[in-house]
Image (cartoon, grey):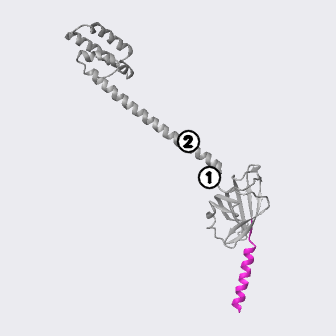
Amino acid sequence: MIRILYFITFFILSFSTIASIEGKLEIKSPNEKINLGDIVKGKMIIWPLEDKSTYWINGLEGKYVFDNALYITKILKYGFSQNNYDVLEVDFDLVLLQPVENNMTLLFDYENIKVPVKLVLSSSINQIDKPIESFVYINETFNKVYTSVEKLIYLSLLILFVILIVAMGSYLYFKKYLKKKRMKRRQELIEKVNTLSERSEIEDIVNIKTDLIKLSILGENDFKEIKDELDKIQYQENWNEDELKNILIVIKEKISRNDVRI
């Protein structure tokens, strides 16, 4: 019988202690108006707490609290008050997801019970017709929570960024490909000029004038001088050895001016 009375007494005392737990939530913002979706500073005070364990506090980060009215993005600091060791203080960054009013009571889940917490606002809330039902928290360094419309905008910007990266990569690849192709063609022409020996080969230089100049193998004036020398003997039926040798010397001399080794 004594044990039963002791149990009943302990239960009543425990229940009265639990039932007496209450709290206050202060929400502060440097702005006069707070929009739903803004990140603001919050300070929650709960008392009296006989249980001094605080392991559960870090678990609040990234969680919906107060019946999904708020979302905690980051725990800043926490601890029991130096003035009253039964009072727990928790500072955090949070997001307002539902319209709230000053001095209204919110319910906070603590040890499987609902703790009434009085809300104290430093700024008024811009009221909207309905709460934010879904959002994506990108990064705390942005100091913002992105709603569906903003998410779409940033996703579009991300896609545009990827397209620009792909386009830039394609441009650099194509530029490198053209340069490689140009150098290959240039080397082919240099080798062709380097191995000139027959009259028909020399006369064929006129047909590749554009490439010789475009690829910086010959300059405009250099080609004109070669063409002038070629015109002197071009209409002769036959070229003697000296004439052939002389035109080859002129060609190689002009090419050498462009720092091309042949």
Q: Mark 2, residues whose alpha carbon is within 10 Å: few (<14), some, or many (≥20)? A: few
In the rendered image, which residue does mark 1 sit on? 140
Magenta stretch encompasses residue 13: yes
Mark 1 or 2, closer to the camera = 2
Up-down: is 102 above or below 188?
below
In what element is the residue under mark 1? helix
Which corner quadrant holds the C terminus?
top left
Magenta stretch encompasses residue 40: no
Residue 70 in view here: yes
Q: Mark 1, residues whose alpha carbon is within 10 Å: few (<14), some, or many (≥20)? A: few
Residue 185: quadrant of the picture = top left
In the rendered image, which residue does mark 2 sit on? 160
x, y percent for residue 238: 21, 9
Up-down: is 103 above or below 159?
below
- If you read the primary sequence from the N terminus, does the residue marked by circle 1 or circle 2 appear first? 1
x, y percent for residue 135: 64, 54
Determine the residue located farthest toward the right in the rendered image. Answer: 103
Q: What stretch of residues is rendered in magenta?
A: 1-23
Nearer to us in this view, 177 or 85: 177
